[in-house]
Image (tube, coloured by chain):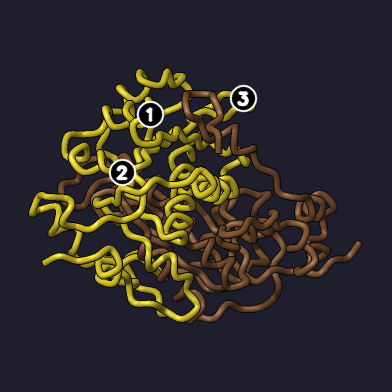
Chain colours: A yellow, B brown
C-alpha cells in the first residue's frame, strides 16, 4: 500500500466539529518527512505564534534552538535523540530543541509552571505548523544532559523537548514496516466523559 | 474612561501577521466577565479541542473539573483561589480546575511530561475559547491542597491550574482602579530574537 501525504492526512484527521478550529483536528505527529526545506519566513510564523502564548507572571520561560538540515545545530540535536527517534527524525528538515527557564528571572526562585508554559508554547508552535501544512513531532526521547552539554545550556534552564518538523513525506519512505504501520494508524483519544468532570470521576453533562 | 469589550479587544490584540492563525493574536486573559452564561454546547467545543492535544505516550494526563456559576463545583473552585483572584474571578460564569495525572497509567511510574502536556491541553482550551469569542484567564494563584481536599483528587493526580472563563465584560465592572488599568494595558512579549536561537543566546536569522 502506497499512500500520499494527503491520503494519510485523511486517515489521521479527527472528525470535524462545527465551530472548532480545524487545526486541532488536523494536527498529528508524523514521522515521514518530504525532502523539502522549510523557508525562514515560514519558521518565523511558527515562532510568532509561540511568542503570544500565556505564561505565569508573563515570564515566557520558553527558548527554542532551531537547526536546519545538516547545520551544526541540527546535527547536535539529532545526536541527542534516542536511537529509535534518530532513525526517522534524520529525515526532518528542521530539528528544534525546546528549553524551559526553570527559575523566575525577576528573583531566581523556582518556577513551578516552567514545563506547563513550555508545553503551551510548543502547542502554539505545532498548531501553527498544522495550519501551514507542516507536520511536527514532539519527542521526550532524547538525552537532556547531552543537549545541555552540546549547547552550553545554563543551569537555570532545562532542555525538555525535541521537535522534528517539516512537510510530510510518504509513509513508504520510512522503510520500516512497524513505522509505516504507526504512520497509518488512526489517532485515538479518551472520550470527553473520561476527562471532563463535574465531580471527581463523574462526567460533566455537556 | 468607559470601554466596551470590543474596544478593549482592539487594545489587546497583537498585530496580525499573514498566515498566522488569528486566535494566537486575539487570545488574552481578561478579568472582567459579562453576566452571560456559557452554553453547554459551547463548553463541549472547548473540550473537543482539548481532547486532541498531543501527549507523551498518548497518556492524555489532563482532567478538568468544570463548575458553572453558583453550582457546588464552581463554589469549591472559587473557595480555593488566592484572595486577589477571588475578587475578580467571582464574576466568571465558568470556573475550571485543571488536574494532571502525574504517573503513567500503564505502569504508575512518574510522568515527567504531566505538566507539559496539561499546559498544551489548556492552550488548546483557551485558544478555542478565543476562537468562539470567549475569554479565559489561567491562574496559578490557588491552593492546590485545598483543591485536592475539596474534590477528593487521588494522590496520582495534581491540581495545577484554575481557569476563569466567560464572555468578556466591561472593564469598569471590575471596580478597582488597578484591575481596570491592567485590563486596558497592552500585552507585551519578548522579541523573537530573545527566544529563538541558532546557538545558545544567539538569535536565529529568520
Circles 2 and 3 on the same subunit: yes
Mark 2 or mark 1: name the one nearer the start of the chain: 1
Which subunit holds the residue at mark 3?
A
Q: Which of the labelled discs sits on residue A127, or is there none?
A: none
Question: A153 left or right of A185?
Answer: right
| Circle 2 SS class | loop
Mark 2 or mark 3: name the one nearer the start of the chain: 2
- Residue marked by disc 3: A107
Quarter of the figure with the N terminus of chain B? bottom right
Label 3 packing within 10 angstroms: few (<14), some (14-19), many (20+): few
Task: Name the spot of residue A66 as percent of width and height, x first.
Answer: 44, 35
Question: A88 left or right of A161?
Answer: left
Q: Which of the labelled discs sits on residue A92, or is there none?
A: 2
In the image, is residue B42 above or below residue B158?
A: below
Task: Name the spot of residue A202 as percent of width and height, x first.
Answer: 34, 71
Please report the residue visible at 17 percent of the width from the left and 34 percent of the height from the top.
A83
Question: B151 left or right of A110?
Answer: left
State whether residue B96 appears in this view: yes
Question: A107 left or right of A80?
Answer: right
Label 2 packing within 10 angstroms: few (<14), some (14-19), many (20+): many
Which subunit holds the residue at mark 1?
A
- Residue marked by disc 1: A71
Label 1 packing within 10 angstroms: few (<14), some (14-19), many (20+): few
Mark 3 or mark 1: name the one nearer the start of the chain: 1
Amino acid at each position: 500500500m502506497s499512500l500520499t501525504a494527503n491520503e494519510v492526512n485523511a486517515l489521521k484527521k479527527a472528525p470535524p466539529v462545527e465551530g472548532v478550529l480545524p487545526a486541532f483536528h488536523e494536527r498529528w505527529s508524523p514521522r515521514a518527512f518530504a525532502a523539502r526545506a522549510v523557508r525562514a519566513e515560514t519558521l518565523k510564523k511558527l515562532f510568532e505564534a509561540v511568542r503570544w502564548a500565556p505564561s505565569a507572571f508573563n515570564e515566557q520561560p520558553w527558548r527554542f534552538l532551531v537547526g536546519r538540515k545538516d547545520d551544526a545545530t541540527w546535527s547536535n540535536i539529532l545526536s541527542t535523540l534516542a536511537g529509535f527517534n534518530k532513525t526517522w527524525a534524520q529525515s526532518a528538515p528542521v530539528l528544534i530543541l525546546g528549553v524551559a527557564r526553570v527559575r523566575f528571572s525577576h528573583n531566581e526562585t523556582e518556577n513551578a509552571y516552567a514545563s506547563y508554559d513550555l508545553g503551551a508554547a510548543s502547542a502554539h508552535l505545532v498548531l501553527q505548523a498544522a495550519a501551514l501544512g507542516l507536520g511536527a513531532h514532539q519527542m521526550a526521547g532524547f538525552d537532556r544532559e547531552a543537549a545541555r552539554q552540546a549547547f552550553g545550556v545554563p543551569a537555570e534552564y532545562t532542555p525538555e523537548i525535541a521537535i522534528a518538523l517539516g512537510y510530510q513525506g510518504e509513509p513508504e519512505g520510512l522503510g520500516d514496516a512497524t513505522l509505516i504501520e504507526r504512520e497509518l494508524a488512526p489517532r485515538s483519544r479518551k472520550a470527553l466523559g473520561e476527562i471532563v468532570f463535574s465531580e471527581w470521576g463523574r462526567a460533566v453533562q455537556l
